[in-house]
Amino acid sequence: MRSLDDIREEYEFLDGDERYRLLIELGRELDAMPDALKTDATKVRGCSASVWVYPMTQDDGKLHFLADSNAAITKGIVALVISTVQDRPAADVAATDIAAALEPFDLKNQLSSNRTQGVPNMITLIRETAARYAAS
């Protein structure tokens, strides 16, 4: 997965339609999430599309997230969110201000509110999950 800085550099040089294409491309780059993990427990509430996020701990204690959506642009937004915290220690993930990291992308003005309404819920889910892992 690309770093958030690399994505931001590319994003800044693109116009609206090209930004949509970049988001779709980012969604395609997510690790495949097995259908068996797409359950009610992994579903993010409040999204207009279906979104699932599943955390896994790696041998080195870092968190790796699998995620998916049934909508291409939404899946790209999911990939953008995940790129802020992917493969980092749980305590770091829990402490990361994901919303602030995403501010340069100005998603609220770039995309319809339907596409971004679930982002705060996804961020909360990721940070709360990371906090539980960090505490254990």
Image (spheres, rainbow, N blue to C red):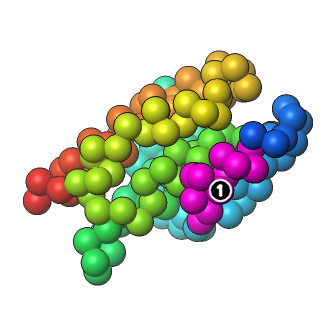
Is 102 inside the magenta-drawn segment? no
| Residue 122 x, y percent position in the rendering | 45, 38
Q: With 76 as the anchor, is 62 left or right in this view?
A: left
Looking at the rendered structure, the kind of residue marked 1 is Asp
Residue to which mark 1 is pinned: 6
**Residue 68 in sight:** no
Quarter of the rendering containing residue 90: bottom left
Is 8 inside the magenta-drawn segment? yes
| Residue 32 x, y percent position in the rendering | 60, 67
Q: With 81 as the anchor, is 39 left or right in this view?
A: left
| Residue 100 x, y percent position in the rendering | 46, 32
Q: Residue at x 56, y 23 (%)?
A: 117
Q: Residue at x 11, y 54 (%)?
A: 135
Classed neighbour count for the residue bearing mark 1: other residues with Cα under 10 Å, few (<14), some (14–19), many (≥20): few
Q: Secondary structure at mark 1?
A: helix
Q: Nearer the viewer, residue 127 or 9?
A: 9
| Residue 57 x, y percent position in the rendering | 31, 69
Q: Is residue 118 above or below residue 125?
A: above
Q: With 58 as the anchor, is 47 left or right in this view?
A: right
Q: Main secondary structure of the magenta part?
A: helix
Q: Which residues are magenta?
A: 1-11
Q: Residue at x 57, y 59 (%)?
A: 3
Q: Residue at x 70, y 49 (%)?
A: 9
